[in-house]
Amino acid sequence: MKRSLPAVRWPWIAALAAASAAILCSAPAQYLGRQQDDIIYVIGSQSLAQGDYRIFTSIGNPPLVNFPPGFPLLLLPVSALWGGQPAAYQAFCALLLASLPWLLWRWLRRRLGGTEAALAALLFATSPVTLSQSGAVMSESAYTAVAVLLLAALEAGRRGTAGLLLLGLTQLRLAGFSLLPAVLWRPGSRGRARALAASLLPAAGGLLAWVAWSQRSSHGVGEFHVFSLFYAYRDLGWLHPLKVLADNVRFYLGEWGGCYLPPAWSAAGAFLGAVLAALALRGAWRAWPEDRARPAILMLAGTAAMHAVWPWQYDRYLIPLLPWLLWLLAAGTGARARWLLALLLAAQLGSHTHRWVLGRHSWRTPELARTYEWVRTRTAPSDAITSALPLRDGFHCARPSLPLPRPLDAEGFAAQLRRYRVRLVLWQEELDVGLSLPRDSAAARRLAGLRAILEDGRRFRLVHEDAVEGARIYELR
């Protein structure tokens, strides 16, 4: 029997309006380039507007083979109308994120009731995880919105629509393939070949076309995320995946639980996150017998499993998980859901939300601002740089950039820089690139080897150092 929707009430509308206002007031929560991927999306979209898909700010104009074009395509109208204005991209992404509470509430109120759904939407919108991405030119908000639409299509049995939405999700982020258990549940369990094909073929075709273009454009040397996963685990032993799993579970439980605790109590975040996760598991157990609930549970399970073994960890990865975690948390609490959600909301508002809404944080300005200024004023516009985050650093230095060359022996590294006519190497201490087990990672070993090369006074000389920013500029002799 179809559950009737509760009537829309003005307090719910006011709550959702406040949720969207909190997101908009927090924008831009981060400067453009802080996450490097945001710069890649902007460059990709501007390149698409010119009929190509290349990193035109990098030496050699390489094809953009490691990011599918879905999100740059979504940004294409912004690139066409305001391509030179970073604020236009930030405003577009802030508006997209601000629409999510309304979309989530519409989905949640069929399952939790209007008040509980409004509280869950408010919890999502005012989470520090969400607000820290307000205005960030990243794909998580678009991905989450399309995931809600995919669930609605799956629940309504619209397999053709679901197949097209899965295509969109996998072109926004390759992580969209983690949703296959949700998409395949009904056609797979009932043996419907046509429904299975309608669900899978668009995404599979899109992936094959993307891989074929990437291989052809890069002459077979392009790097894809699946290869990044291989390189991250290579030569680290069979226990390393288990260590990554444990570290990722600790990290994400800590990030979720920490949303409801004062910063001084952050050490208890993993414990609170574990308690909330246990309640969500109870909710999944309760909801599983309902056939319409299974796609959402499988969607959450597939995404969580992927991030458990993916050897990079960022709090923004929680955004596509948070709506379903809050739904199952409420389902696991039963009649007390309203009070638990209200308590968590009060704790979150008091502990974190105000900092982001009022802009009382340090992510709005580049942490290497003085170093970037030194490069802009002391070097020529044609002087190229290389660094661990070349697109971010090249953008803010207003200089051509090059990824760190692969050879890590001193002579090979210097030879590669001379080949591409790169004079400057920007080095940042304590660089956080979101690695699980950073001390054990292949990337950390590579950076340690580079650090030793740069100290070789026969090939490099230190021309600038900022101890406060933890930055150095080396020049090739």
Image (spheres, rainbow, N blue to C red):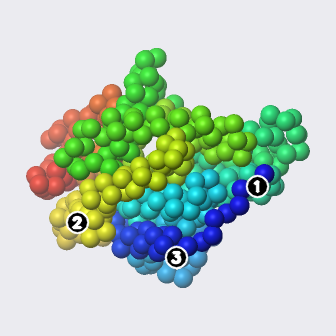
**Residue drawn at x 35%, y 69% as measured from the top left:** 26
State the image quarter where residue 192 is shown.
Answer: top right
Q: Which residue type does callout 3 highlight?
A: Trp
Q: Are marks 3 and 1 in contact (CB under 8 Å)?
A: no
Q: Which badge, 3 or 2, is on the more N-terminal residue?
A: 3
Residue 391 at x, y = what percent?
39, 58
From this viewpoint, which residue is outermost toward the left? 467
From this viewpoint, which residue is outermost toward the top? 238
Residue under circle 3? 10
**Mark 2 neighbour density, 10 Å: few (under 14) some (14–19) many (20 or more):** few
Residue 205 shown left or right of residue 380 in the figure: right
Question: What separation in Å lies between label 3 and label 1 (alpha carbons)?
Answer: 25 Å
Nearest the eye: 361 or 412: 361
- Label 3 sits on a secondary structure element that is helix
Question: What separation in Å lies between label 1 and label 2 (alpha carbons)?
Answer: 46 Å
Residue under circle 2? 360
Residue 217 at x, y = what percent?
62, 52
State the image quarter where residue 232 is shown.
Answer: top left
State the image quarter where residue 342 is shown.
Answer: bottom left
Q: Which badge, 3 or 1, is on the more N-terminal residue?
A: 1
Residue under circle 1? 2
Residue 463 at x, y = what percent?
14, 55
Nearest the eye: 224 or 299: 299
- Label 1 sits on a secondary structure element that is loop
In the image, residue 286 above or below residue 215 = above
Q: Which residue type does callout 2 highlight?
A: Arg
Residue 237, numbered label = none
